[in-house]
């Protein structure tokens, strides 16, 4: 910890740091990192919970679960691809907000509707669609916010934020499961409900961050890469 603190102090003081930690404190960049961390906390961190619920609670085989993942992945690819054309009307910041909102609807809906395979798939796929929108828009927002010589560092910090979000999500949701086991083997329904509540909470944080960035962007198209200056 002492070495880490020393490194941070040095990097903040030198004129040409190896890693420009000042990125973490830019008001227009921090919301994007929060969106990435929050959405990936929910989407990536919840993968184990999703698979366990489909297998244990819905009685699906491993093969059936794998087959059901195919349309989910396809939907994420589709919404990611749609982010660019939709941004011409809304701007990428608002696409991020839509993605975060879909994560909230997905996890929130599962709290109340998860008794059948169709119910579960409808809400689970909404979350996948939200992940696609965020994946297709957040990096584009970063491009619009960074100078050309900052692109590599800025995108790296964003990548770090989503990895940390996913890792924390896996740990937190795993801890919730561990604290809510039936006969010490499988999660109780309360455990799943608490997982979905945690996902909703992180989705709300991500949505607020996306809305903060979107309202700061002013003109709806200002946050597109094409509108970014060569600063």
Image (tube, rainbow, N blue to C red):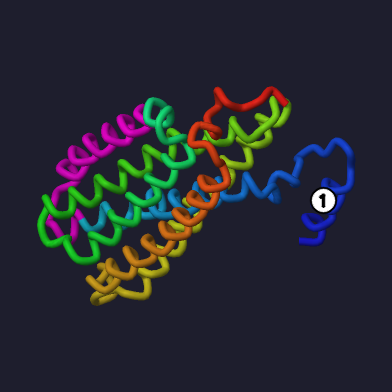
Image point (40%, 50%), residue name: 100
The image quadrant that residue 73 belongs to is: top left
On screen, residue 93 versus residue 19, left or right, reads left
* Residue at the spot 66% in from the left edge and 29% down from the top edge: 151
Q: Is residue 51 left or right of residue 96?
A: left
Q: Between residue 97 and residue 185, name the one nearer to us.
A: 97
> In the image, 77: left or right of 40?
left
Specify the principal SS of the magenta part: helix
Q: Which residues are magenta?
A: 54-83
Residue 193: x %, y % from top left: 28, 69
Between 203 and 185, the one nearer to me in the picture: 203
Q: Is residue 68 magenta?
A: yes
Q: Which residue is mark 1?
A: 7
Which quadrant holds the N terminus? bottom right
Q: How many marks?
A: 1
Give the crowd class for mark 1: few <14, some 14-19, many >=20 residues within 10 Å.
few
Q: What is the residue that sits farthest to the right in this orientation? A: 14
* Residue closer to the observer: 223 or 6: 223
Question: Against 70, is 116 above or below?
Answer: below
Residue 228 horizontal/vertical position (percent): 61, 27
Label 1 element class:
helix
Residue 43, horizontal then vertical, whole percent: 38, 49
Above/below status of 173 relative to 215: below
In the image, residue 60 lies in the stretch drawn in magenta: yes
């Amino acid at each position: 910890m002492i070495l880490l603190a020393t490194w941070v102090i040095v990097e903040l003081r030198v004129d040409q740091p190896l890693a420009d930690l000042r990125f973490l404190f830019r008001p227009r960049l921090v919301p994007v990192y929060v969106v990435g961390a929050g959405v990936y906390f929910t989407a990536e961190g919840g993968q184990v919970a999703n698979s366990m619920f489909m297998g244990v609670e819905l009685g699906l085989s491993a093969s059936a679960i794998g087959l059901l993942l195919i349309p989910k992945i396809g939907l994420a690819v589709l919404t990611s691809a749609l982010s660019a054309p939709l941004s011409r009307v809304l701007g990428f910041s608002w696409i991020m907000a839509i993605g975060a909102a879909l994560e909230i609807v997905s996890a929130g809906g599962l709290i109340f509707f998860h008794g059948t395979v169709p119910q579960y798939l409808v809400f689970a796929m909404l979350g996948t669609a939200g992940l696609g929108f965020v994946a297709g828009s957040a990096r584009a927002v970063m491009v619009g916010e960074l100078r050309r010589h900052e692109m590599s560092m800025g995108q790296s910090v964003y990548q770090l934020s989503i990895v940390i979000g996913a890792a924390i999500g896996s740990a937190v949701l795993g801890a919730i499961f561990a604290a809510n086991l039936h006969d010490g083997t499988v999660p109780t329904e309360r455990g799943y409900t608490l997982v979905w509540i945690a996902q909703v909470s992180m989705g709300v944080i991500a949505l607020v961050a996306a809305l903060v960035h979107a309202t700061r962007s002013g003109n709806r198209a200002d946050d597109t890469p094409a509108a970014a200056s060569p600063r």
